[in-house]
Amino acid sequence: MEYHKQTQLKHYNSFQTEAFAELFCEPRNIEELRKCLSDYPHKKKLIIGGGCNVFFTKDFDGLVIHTDIKGLREISDEEEEDEDIFIEVKASENWDGLVSYCVDRGFAGLENLSLIPGTVGAAPIQNIGAYGAEVKDVIKEVVSIDMETNDVVSFSNQECEFGYRDSIFKRANRYIIISVIFHLKRTFTYIPKYFDLNKELENIEEPTIQDVREAVIRVRQRKLPDEKVLPNAGSFFKNPYITKEHADKIIEDYPGLPAYLQKDGMVKTSAAFLIDKAGYKGKREKSVGSYPNQPLIIVNYGTPDGNDIVSFMKDIQKAVKHIFNIDLEPEVRIY
């Protein structure tokens, strides 16, 4: 394994913003990963997988670790019934490749998360979700390296402290995920969860797992830009949670506001709706804009400077705050 100085990071983030890493390496196994941690114990470190949820506004003064640890194995648990299937997947495997593998074999649980870009290791960090499903629902265990001790540390589902687009891995910035163990099912029954997906499948009486994957892909391709064609990081903002009183007040002026009452009494609403009503759907400022088909996505039309994206982000936040008194929080990590 080699260390490279002043490595351009443009092709390691899906927004394709330019920045240089002081040091850069690509460990291909756990031993190499541990070595780069022990070689530079005091350097600031950044772990990059597919780079689909990060972009750069400046050079990174430290060590960027782009892991390339791959592999997949089906494992059994004698204590579980035959209905259950467990799969351990290394962190650098392509996420949608994993979903395709599981759907082809009839292993249920990941199909609603089809076509999400990125790697398997990134999925628990963000607790990725789409079309009524979250990855936390099918994770049994996450295996990681503790950057402070260089030890292998495993986390049960509960120990991962999953939340909405959140986990202990996102908050602690201490653990490098090396593999994820998924708990899936060998049989599948479609359970309606999400309006767009239900509509896509309305003419199929009993959708198969393959039908669901294909429907999710069609919906995503209609709504979302391909990051290889229009650089982006997917959903840029989290959907906000507000009080019921706040939601009721907004609905007086905007009756179409999506409002989903939560168990704790808060209301989850749609960042895309707020951005649209604030006048930013399809809006473009120089080389940055929001995607016309989905205002939740900011796209890069050609700027190499991540600060241009930050400026556009702040304009959206300011407009939504002014109209709705809601603070939009970005999902994307900004360096």
Image (cartoon, rainbow, N blue to C red):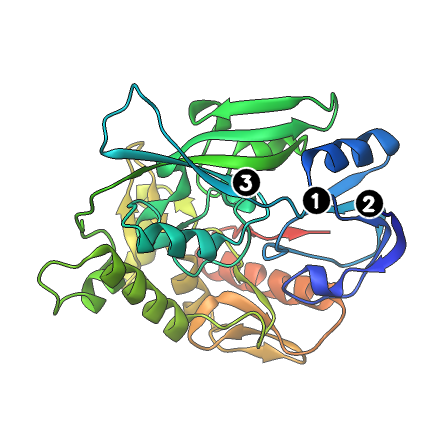
Task: Tell me how far mark 2 sits from mark 3, CA to CA.
Answer: 26 Å
Q: Which mark is residue 1?
A: 2
Label 2 or label 3, whichever lies nearer to me, is 2
Which amino acid type is marked by label 3? Ile
Identified at 67% across, 34% down, the residue is 173
Percent x, y of residue 260: 28, 47
Local SS, label 1:
loop
Q: Does the residue at mark 2 contact the one at mark 1 (Cβ under 8 Å)?
A: yes
Q: Which mark is residue 28?
A: 1
**Which residue is identified by label 3?**
125
Percent x, y of residue 108: 28, 46
Which amino acid type is marked by label 2? Met
Q: Split into 4 quadrants, where in the image is the N terminus?
A: top right
- In terms of depth relative to the viewer, which is nearer, 258 or 133? 133
Looking at the image, tell me whether mark 2 or mark 1 is earlier in sequence order. Answer: 2
Looking at the image, tell me whether mark 1 or mark 3 is earlier in sequence order. Answer: 1
**Quadrant of the rendered structure where residue 230 is?**
bottom right
- In terms of depth relative to the viewer, which is nearer, 128 or 119? 119
- In terms of depth relative to the viewer, which is nearer, 279 or 1? 1
Q: Is residue 119 above or below residue 278?
A: above
